Image (spheres, rainbow, N blue to C red):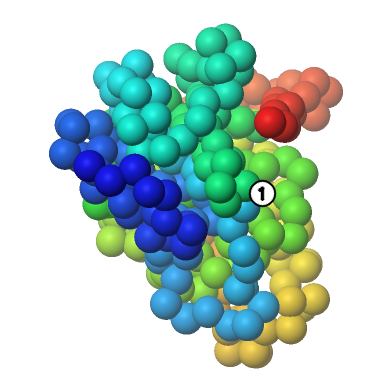
Amino acid sequence: MGSRIIREPVEEALRLIEEAEKQNIILRLLGGVAVNMHTEKEPEVFKRDYSDIDLVVDQDSGPKVAKFLKQMGYEPNISFNTYNGHERQLYYDLENQRQMDIFVGDFRMCHYIPLKNRLLVEPYTIPRAELLLTKIQIVEMNYKDIIDLSALMLNNEVTEDDSAVSYLQIADLCSNDWGLYKTFSLNVDKLVETLPKLKLEDEDMDIVVSRFRHLVNKVEKAPKKLKWKMRSMVGEKVPWYELPEEVQR
């Protein structure tokens, strides 16, 4: 097994996923590199560098991933992993000055996105519905997040099933979690307001906006669960999200 890390992030992610599979470890991409893998049409404004690689590992393989990544050439953040390793682990590609975030079983940042039963839907990334949610759940979205969300929506239709961005999956998760729903709604509004600044072609911008509006419509119409209704009564009186700390090497 080769441990030479590839500088190009998409190729490196593919190397890791394929090598992990040989050891019965399920790894799937999320984040910007995952969006890039689902991007065929890439206007100039969407092109960006990737300073990290984000992956999720299945719960059973969480304890094995440290040995695997050492074999693949990565250095662990020992203190962070000791305290947080059951949910999240950090590793470093020292040669290319790149950080790797490993989520174990599920995704927890500003909001919780369950993934453990969805890791085999796609061969290399998490399902596109959850990929969108892991981006749009960021309360303090930055320019790169908006680019990634716009690229994902430009290149992938909103569909009923997992062949693209499944509105059923997004609506189901948002209808059970008022906090996630609230952040989703606020960030769609923010994204649509920001889109003109990206200076996309009119046709591309229309596609992104119409797909987001279609998705919002599906989420709004979905029946809300009791848990959602109870939390909605509290509203914005208490925070509905977490603000995870950025961990630096």
Residue at x 55% of width, y 69% of height: 151
Q: Position of residue 160 (x, y in %)?
A: 32, 58
- Percent of width and height locating residue 171: 46, 45
Judge left or right: residue 174 versus residue 183: left
Quick check: 209 left or right of 29? right
Front residue of 52/121: it is 52
The answer, for residue 135, to whether it is visible in the render is no
From what the image shows, is residue 157 above or below residue 62? below
Q: Residue 234: in sight, yes or no?
A: yes
Asked whether 248 or 109 is in front, the reply is 248
* In front of the other: 42 or 166: 42
- Image quadrant occupied by the C terminus: top right
Tell me the quarter of the picture where residue 23 sits.
top left
Residue extending furthest toward the bottom? 202
Determine the residue located farthest toward the right in the rendered image: 237
Looking at the image, residue 191 lies above or below residue 239: below
Left or right of 73? Residue 190 is: right
Q: Is residue 208 left or right of residue 7?
A: right
Few, some or many residues within 10 Å of mark 1 (<14, 14–19, 20+): some
Identify the element where label 1 is drawn: helix
Q: Residue at x 33, y 33 (%)?
A: 71
Q: Nearer the viewer, residue 45 or 135?
A: 45
Q: Quadrant of residue 243?
A: top right
* Residue 159 image position (x, y, % from top left): 36, 62
Say which amino acid is labelled 1.
Ser
Residue at the image point whose x is 34% and y is 43% from the top: 3
Q: How many marks?
A: 1
Q: Which residue is mark 1?
A: 185
Tell me the residue at 60%/18% (across/down).
Answer: 80
Residue 38: x, y in percent?
A: 40, 65
